[in-house]
Amino acid sequence: MLDVPASFITLAEERFPDADARYVLPHLIEFYRVSAAIPPVHGVIEDGQILVVSGHKYYKAALALGRSSMRVIVRSADTDQVDRFRAKPGVTLVDVDEIRRRERGEPEVDLLHLFFFAEPLTEAQKTEFDRRFVSFFRALVDRCGQGGELFHVKDLGYSEKTASASFVVRVPAEDQGWYSSYLGISKAFDREVAQILSFNGHELP
């Protein structure tokens, strides 16, 4: 994986179209405005440039947010071509092993949950959001029966301007056993209470 200046990356959608329609670009931009690092794009090297093969909306979000560089997973069997590209100014090799070691050293992470709705939530819908989503994590806190911040919710807020709701919750870094039940709650809320346009930048599956 490489860290590449944005000026060396471009789209060629006539050759490599964006095949992933799950993401809602304006919502994805807002998510990465306040959340974690944008995931890497996949690309090929041609004429000293990276052509994005997949991850088009990650690329567009990075540009919209003014990111000066982004991570790229290069799809190329030509080692000499990759080596020549790595020699360009500002291109650096990402130490993936170091990232993994650092992640293993952080067993818990704070995860932003950002929902966009078709319309701003009413007071009754906000109460229902709290009852379904926030109470879900409160129940996990009770079930875990341990100290610390695991599954604690903070910074709950609603925006009428953007018709959104958000909060931050501490979750296990490598255990997403809670997610399938959480997804079920999201789908039920979308069906029964208020239409969810996106969660963390993508449509509900």
Image: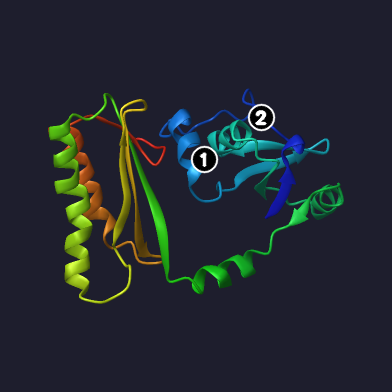
Which residue matches tag 2?
Answer: 11
Quick one: SS at disc 1? helix
Q: Which residue is mark 1?
A: 33
Mark 1 is on which residue type?
Arg
Helix, strand or loop under label 2:
loop
Foreground mark, 2 or 1, reads: 1
Q: How is the image coloured?
A: rainbow
Point out residue 185 in the picture as x, y percentages from the top left corner.
19, 46
Position of 62 compared to 120: left or right? right
Image quadrant containing the C terminus:
top left
Circle 1 Cα neighbour tier, 10 Å, few/some/many (<14 / 14–19 / ≥20):
some
Which quarter shows the N terminus? Answer: bottom right
Residue 193, numbered circle: none
Q: CA distance from mark 2 to mark 1?
A: 22 Å
Q: Is residue 111 above or below residue 13?
A: below
At x 87%, y 51%, the residue is 87
- Rendered image quadrant of residue 190: top left
Query: On the image, which quarter does residue 120 sit in?
Result: top left
Image coordinates for residue 71, horizontal then vertical, percent:
65, 49
Which amino acid lies under the numbered mark 2 shown in the image of this protein? Answer: Leu
Residue visible at 42% across and 37% down? 201
Q: Is residue 72 visible?
A: yes
Instruction: Please tell me which residue is depicted at 56% across the width and 50% down the height of the picture.
Output: 37
Residue appearing at x 69%, y 59% in the figure = 94
Closest to the observer: 34 or 92?
34
Going from N to C along the chain, the mark reached first, 2 or 1, is 2
